[in-house]
């Protein structure tokens, strides 16, 4: 996304006391030459002063104590994964909610998919995002943070492109020809984005897309408005290794559930369920927008990020998603 959406972190001092700590770490994957900028949210002592994070003139943020030590332990580990041209802030509203309820949350910017870096060509080469998540799990479980987390309770929540990543980590496998076939039949927003990129894929890259990126350490995945579902190999859903929930937005025009999700999944499987959020469009799952956001973003051609398709309040959509996640939250 553009300048406003990915404006630099805004930090405003406050005299109130924090229940969430936040740490900033960069993890270097030398094997794949990727530097992954990462934020970690977690419960902390209530004596630390708060700062506002992930806020700018268009979006509201959340309060946390920078570099405060974690308090407690045996926290379920949540990895939040952003979508195309997104960043760690997009699901920060959810991360802060989870941390307030006793989870250890990891959210990162994924190189070549994040703000200012994503192109149709780079996003179509999507295999590095699930590998990033497995790498981050490696880093957390081998670091000082490991003493605070329950390594047997790991959940990945991905949005849009990140939804693909969540499914891939559960064991879903993909053949991009299925998505091309879908795009030859329908001309929705996601297909339009990739229309000139399919022909650039090499045979080796198509094999990489079809790879197995399952991570058996992950116990639950939630795929919110996931990308590439028409490319899923149906048999791979029979052997998912994580409890999987796919969430669709009723009014999503980018990834319409009736076209891109429901026809391609078997909801009778024991490890897979589908939930649809009434009134939600594709961007409803991002941060809550400030009153002036649409006017500000319109100047950059990005007003759609804050425009709801239905007559709904974004906070109400978030609440409905939290209700879908409540069985997971009950384990916190």
Image (cartoon, helix red, strand yellow):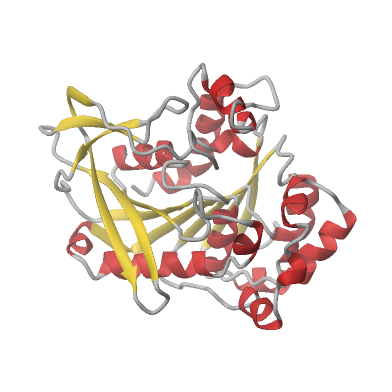
Quadrant containing the N terminus is: top right
Residue 54, horizontal then vertical, whole percent: 37, 36
- Residue 266 visible at all: no
At horizontal 21% and vertical 66% (from top left) the residue drawn is 143
Residue 263, horizontal then vertical, whole percent: 80, 55
Residue 272, horizontal then vertical, whole percent: 62, 59
At horizontal 37% and vertical 61% (from top left) the residue drawn is 36
User: Which one is nearer the viewer's eye here, 121 or 97?
Assistant: 121
At horizontal 51% and vertical 47% (from top left) the residue drawn is 86
- Residue 217 visible at all: yes
Q: Work out which residue is located at the far left of the displayed protein and give it.
A: 47
User: Which one is nearer the viewer's eye here, 81 or 3?
Assistant: 3
User: Which one is nearer the viewer's eye here, 273 or 54?
Assistant: 54
**Residue 262 in the image: above or below residue 128:** above
Residue 184, horizontal then vertical, whole percent: 87, 59
**Residue 57 in the image: above or below residue 126:** above
Report the number of discs. 0
- 331 with respect to 115 (left or right): left
């Amino acid at each position: 996304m553009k300048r406003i959406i990915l404006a630099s972190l805004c930090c405003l001092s406050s005299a109130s006391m924090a229940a969430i700590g936040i740490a900033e770490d960069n993890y270097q994957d030398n094997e794949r030459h990727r530097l992954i900028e990462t934020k970690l949210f977690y419960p902390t002592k209530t004596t630390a002063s708060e700062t506002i994070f992930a806020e700018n003139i268009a979006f509201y943020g959340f309060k946390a104590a920078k570099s405060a030590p974690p308090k407690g332990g045996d926290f379920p580990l949540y990895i939040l994964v952003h979508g195309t041209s997104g960043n760690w802030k997009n699901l920060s509203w959810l991360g802060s909610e989870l941390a307030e309820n006793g989870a250890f949350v990891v959210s990162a910017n994924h190189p070549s998919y994040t703000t200012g870096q994503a192109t149709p060509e780079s996003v179509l080469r999507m295999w590095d995002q699930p590998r990033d998540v497995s790498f981050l799990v490696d880093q957390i479980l081998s670091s000082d943070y490991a003493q605070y987390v329950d390594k047997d309770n790991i959940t990945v929540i991905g949005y849009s492109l990140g939804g693909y990543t969540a499914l891939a980590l559960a064991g879903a496998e993909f053949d991009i020809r299925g998505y091309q076939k879908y795009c030859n039949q329908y001309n929705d927003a996601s297909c339009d984005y990739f229309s000139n990129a399919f022909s650039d894929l090499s045979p080796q890259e198509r094999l990489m897309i079809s790879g197995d990126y399952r991570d058996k350490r992950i116990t639950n995945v939630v795929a919110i408005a996931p990308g590439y579902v028409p490319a899923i190999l149906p048999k791979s859903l029979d052997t998912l290794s994580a409890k999987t929930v796919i969430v669709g937005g009723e009014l999503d025009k980018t990834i319409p559930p009736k076209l891109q999700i429901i026809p391609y999944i078997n909801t009778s499987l024991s490890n897979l369920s589908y939930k649809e959020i009434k009134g939600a469009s594709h961007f409803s799952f991002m941060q809550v927008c400030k009153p002036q956001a649409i006017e500000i973003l319109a100047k950059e051609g990005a007003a759609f990020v804050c425009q709801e398709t239905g007559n709904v309040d974004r906070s109400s959509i978030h609440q409905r998603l939290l209700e879908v996640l409540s069985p997971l939250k009950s384990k916190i």
